[in-house]
Amino acid sequence: MDQSTLSQSLLGLHKAASIYDRVVQLSDYIFRDEALANKEEHLQELAFLLHGVKGTDTILTIFNHKTYLPELEVGVEEFWGALPNETKDQRMKNILSILHKDYSTFPYESVDWLTGIFPKIPFEDRVNMKIHHCCMRFVRTNGTQIRLFSQGIPVQVDEHRNFRYTLNYVQNIQHLIKKDFTFFWIRLSYGKQQELVQTYHSDTKKSSKRDLLSDREKEILRLIAEDLDTKEIAQQLFISVNTIGNHRSKMLERLGVRDTTALVQLAKMTGMI
């Protein structure tokens, strides 16, 4: 992908993030009761918002954590391609059927991980939650491949602050991820200042209370985002140029991104910097 095309894709993602923030505000008054009222009206509002990011491979989903099925979806046909128009349960099976074989463990590993860690999170810390899933590869029926980045927030919780419904904003980030990256990772942030983090990486198959990037790596990445070159960063942090290069290589490998531009973008999308 040339630099011009990449720049246009990144602009599209920035615009999509802005629309996502508007949808979050909208959802604040949609989900006040346990049941979802006026579904069609809300679907129309979500469709109107999504129109602002047409062409950026984006889908909005209200996900029911009791049934593990979508309640509302916008942009389905444009995103997944020509799948049979069946019930929600059947459509989920159809979607999982186009999941690339390298990621066949994703559905149950991700669910097992979240259901395993959530009960251990203290009630008072179950606030400002945001969850990201990244890098899963799907092959559309026309043969084109997509890579998923999902950003989800709870829009309704029960009295124990367990998820009832989450708003998931899913984007195709094929242009950001290395072709040969066969892993996925998950990041859950929470707490009053979203200062608490739990992560899962399918490479190690381990859950961790440490972030995907270390404090030093985040520090380096923030300076890269400020357009400092390697020599300037080395001088400011009193470390060698080689050390910065090693950190950069490890970050690229861990997150599976193609280059430094994609690394900065993805770190911003997840709130790591």
Image (spheres, rainbow, N blue to C red):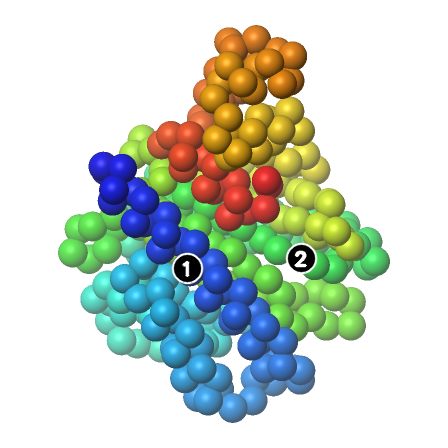
Residue under the image location 74 percent in, 60 percent down: 127
> Nearest the camera: 208 or 45?
45
Q: Residue at x 40, y 35 (%)?
A: 261
> Circle 2 sits in a helix, a strand or a loop, which is it?
loop
> Residue 264 at what x, y percent from top left?
48, 37
32 or 122, nearer to the observer? 32
Quadrant containing the N terminus is top left
In the image, taking residue 258 as reference, residue 185 lies left or right, namely right
Where does label 2 land, which residue?
Answer: 129
Disc on res. 92: none
How far from the left and from the top, in percent, is residue 255?
A: 47, 34
Mark 1 Cα shell of 10 Å, populated few (<14), some (14-19), many (≥20): some
Residue 15 is tagged as 1
The amino acid type of the residue labelled 1 equals: Lys
> Quick check: can you spot residue 142?
yes
Residue 54: x %, y % from top left: 30, 66
**Vertical arrangement, residue 20 with respect to residue 261, above or below:** below
> Which amino acid does the dot numbered 2 rest on?
Met
Q: Report whether 219 appears left or right of 104.
A: right
